[in-house]
């Protein structure tokens, strides 16, 4: 007897992944709460970003959120850190920007008001390249790892970063595009807030564009796992 195989949904693929500690689908049509599929860290929409815009996953009716830099719109996930200081972690986010950014754009940050204690995943100014930043407790940038290629200007992309000890890998659309060895100290202290699409200490870092399906893990996903999530999200 022939068996019918149904395509797995993107949500199902994410929530069944080992190590998931936060997953914000950003599919709310109204209100101020950004639900966390794990239930651990629901967020709050700040400064009224536009909810219910067309989502970035192929064939998925779940919506997304559009953010405007000039209005300092973002999601406050929690007052406190989630990934900072962990030996291993992963951040995955789907993003679409209407134009090349004129300054860096935050996708996920854990940062203090004084600029200290940072785990930050950004799109780089003028190119939209993924990049990862570590700062020290004084707010000084210790290390930046950036990619080549352009991932902005109306395109939809899945960007990801994985960290395993000192090994860092940046991904775009399921493919590893940059590997690096971290030489900066991964030490964090003080007051930290965790945000999506914004940065506590720098008004220039807010996102202009659409953000969708942000997921974080307390382990470094393998390359095949990252690639498969992109394939599912694009309907392959």
Image (cartoon, helix red, strand yellow):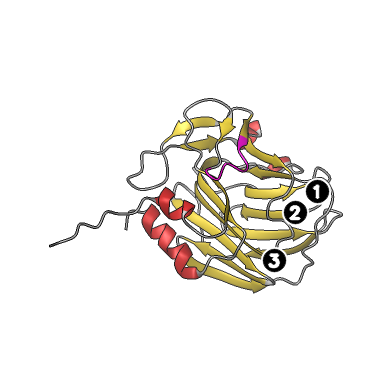
Q: Reply above or below: 3 against 9.
A: below
- Crowding at mark 3 (Cα within 10 Å: few <14, some 14-19, many 20+): some
- Which marked residue is nearer to the observer: mark 1 or mark 3? 3
Q: How far apart are marks 2 and 3 (CA)?
A: 14 Å
Above or below, 102 relative to 185: above
Circles 2 and 3: CB distance less than 8 Å? no
231 vs 127, left or right, is left
Badge 1 vs badge 2, beta-carbon distance below 8 Å: yes
Q: On the rendered image, what quadrant is the N terminus found in?
A: bottom left
Residue occupying the far right of the picture = 138
User: Is residue 70 covered in magenta?
Assistant: no
Front label number (1 vs 2) = 2
In this picture, which residue range is highlighted in magenta? 37-43
Which residue bears the numbered disc 2?
118
Give the Cα separation between the discs numbered 1 and 2. Answer: 8 Å
Residue 46's x, y, as percent?
Answer: 64, 31
Q: Residue 115 carries which label?
A: 1
Q: Is residue 67 above or below residue 12?
A: above
Q: What residue is shown at x 49% (from left), y 69% (from top)?
A: 223
Callout 2 crowding tier (Cα within 10 Å): few <14, some 14–19, many ≥20:
many
Can residue 104 be seen?
no
x, y percent for residue 160: 54, 59
- Mark 2 element type: strand
Residue at left offset 52%, top offset 56%: 159
Residue 48: x %, y % from top left:
59, 27
The image quadrant of residue 61 is top left
Q: Residue 178 appears at what percent x and percent y?
A: 57, 70
Are dots 1 and 3 in contact, CB under 8 Å?
no
Secondary element at image label 3: loop
229 and 99: which is toward the camera: 229
| Residue 87 - label | 3
Q: Residue at x 58, y 61 (%)?
A: 161
């Amino acid at each position: 007897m022939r068996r019918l195989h149904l395509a797995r949904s993107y949500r199902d693929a994410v929530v069944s992944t080992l190590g998931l500690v936060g997953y914000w689908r950003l599919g709310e049509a109204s209100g101020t709460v950004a639900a966390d599929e794990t239930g651990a860290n629901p967020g709050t929409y700040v400064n009224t970003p536009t909810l219910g815009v067309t989502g970035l996953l192929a064939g998925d009716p779940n919506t997304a959120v559009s953010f405007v830099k000039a209005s300092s719109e973002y999601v406050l996930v929690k007052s406190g850190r989630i990934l900072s200081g962990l030996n291993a972690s992963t951040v995955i986010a789907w993003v679409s920007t209407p134009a090349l950014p004129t300054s860096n754009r935050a996708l996920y940050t854990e940062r203090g008001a004084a600029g200290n204690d940072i785990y930050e995943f950004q799109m780089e100014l003028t190119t939209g390249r993924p990049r990862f930043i570590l700062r020290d407790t004084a707010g000084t940038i210790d290390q930046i790892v950036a990619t080549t290629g352009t991932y902005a200007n109306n395109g939809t992309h899945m960007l990801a970063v994985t960290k395993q000890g000192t090994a860092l890998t940046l991904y775009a659309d399921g493919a590893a595009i940059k590997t690096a060895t971290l030489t900066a100290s991964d030490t964090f202290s003080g007051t930290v807030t965790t945000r999506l699409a914004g940065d506590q200490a720098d008004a220039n870092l807010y996102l202009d564009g659409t953000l969708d399906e942000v997921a974080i893990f307390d382990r470094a996903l393998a390359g095949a796992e990252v690639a498969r999530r992109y394939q599912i999200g694009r309907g392959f």
